[in-house]
Image (cartoon, rainbow, N blue to C red):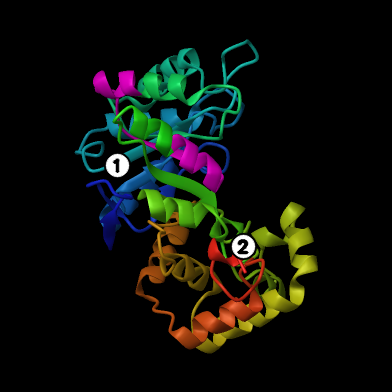
Amino acid sequence: MEYTRLGRSGLSVSRLVLGTMNFGPQTSEADSHTIMDRAHEHGVNFFDTADVYGVRPGDGVTEKIIGRWFGSGGGRRERTVLATKAYLPMGERPNEGGLSALHIRRACDASLRRLNTDHIDLYQMHHIDRSTPWEEIWEAFTVLRQQGKVLYFGSSNFAGWHIAQAQEAARSRHFLGLVSEQSRYNLMTRWAELEVLPAARHYGVGVIPWGPLNGGVLGGVLRKQREGGAARGASGRSAVTLAQHRDAIEAYEKLCADLGEDPAHVGLAWLLAQDGVTGPIIGPRTVGQLDGSLRALRIVLDETTLAKLDELFPPPAPNGAKPAPEAYAW
């Protein structure tokens, strides 16, 4: 396993992040525990979850599954860098969502109970809250840090402007601020390169891509269809994406075949090669999927291959000639 620092912090985390969204809805508790044990065997120490993950909104099932795994001992909690999130509604009553000081306090305490732990290593805002001032948010987070309930703070689904706002507000309080931003980012969804990645690099915020295979579309969907297997990227919104970009995806799968690599692993390897990326979130439903993902760490994409990938899935620079954010200027 490879490790890196989380943003400008001194925290060492694995370059693949174990996502747990499937634990409960798609993967049984027993299988979820097996996947987490195998992750530790591989050296994956960075686990990501959220209070809203589960079968039904507000039930916190995924956090409970992780908490019972921690409770089985064996140093599981001590070997895990634990990240969870708050913001989305956990109920229908007022103050059961958002980033008010009241909800932050209640949400953190509830996650601690479900996760069966006395602290959260990385507490993330699941979304920007446009109605709560940063002074209130950072004050609430400062209290959590002082109480020893949270060590580091991160964001998710923030724009570059939001990252700048958050960091400048934290700086005015002499607070460390954000150390990570969890953003949708993959070969086909590269909007983060315009402002999120430049802002994150400027402020020393590590980027953790979610949806690294764009809903399965970059996971070899066409090959799986030809082989008669179930292809995750062939249904729902992913099916629309597949129909719109079929030629590029077909060329991508051919390029991966020429490299002798699985498309899913190439997609992860491309993210690992991007400046400012801490590590993508993988969300295995089975142990086999987890085992296979580690191949991405051993793939080195040369400049020629990277250029071909840019041709297939061009970066979203407005003027094309310069990298963002300078691309906005003439």
Residue type of the residue flagged with mark 2? Tyr
Q: Residues within 10 Å of mark 2 (few under 14, many from 20)?
A: few
Query: Does 228 appear above or below 25?
Result: below
199 and 127: which one is in front?
199
Q: Is residue 222 something that shows in the picture? A: yes
Q: Which residues are magenta?
A: 142-166
x and y percentages locating residue 190 in the rendered image: 60, 62
Q: Position of residue 228 (x, y in %)?
A: 70, 71
The residue positioned 62% from the left and 67% from the top of the image is: 317
Q: Are marks 1 and 2 in contact (CB under 8 Å)?
A: no
Residue 226, picture quadrant: bottom right
Question: Which residue is pictured at 43% across the width and 84% down the height?
Answer: 302
Task: Tell me the distance, in whole angstroms, between the alpha carbons under discs 1 and 2.
Answer: 38 Å
Crowd band around label 1 with a 10 angstrom C-alpha radius: few (<14), some (14–19), many (20+): some
Position above or below: 318 against 53 = below
Please name the residue that numbered disc 2 is placed on.
328
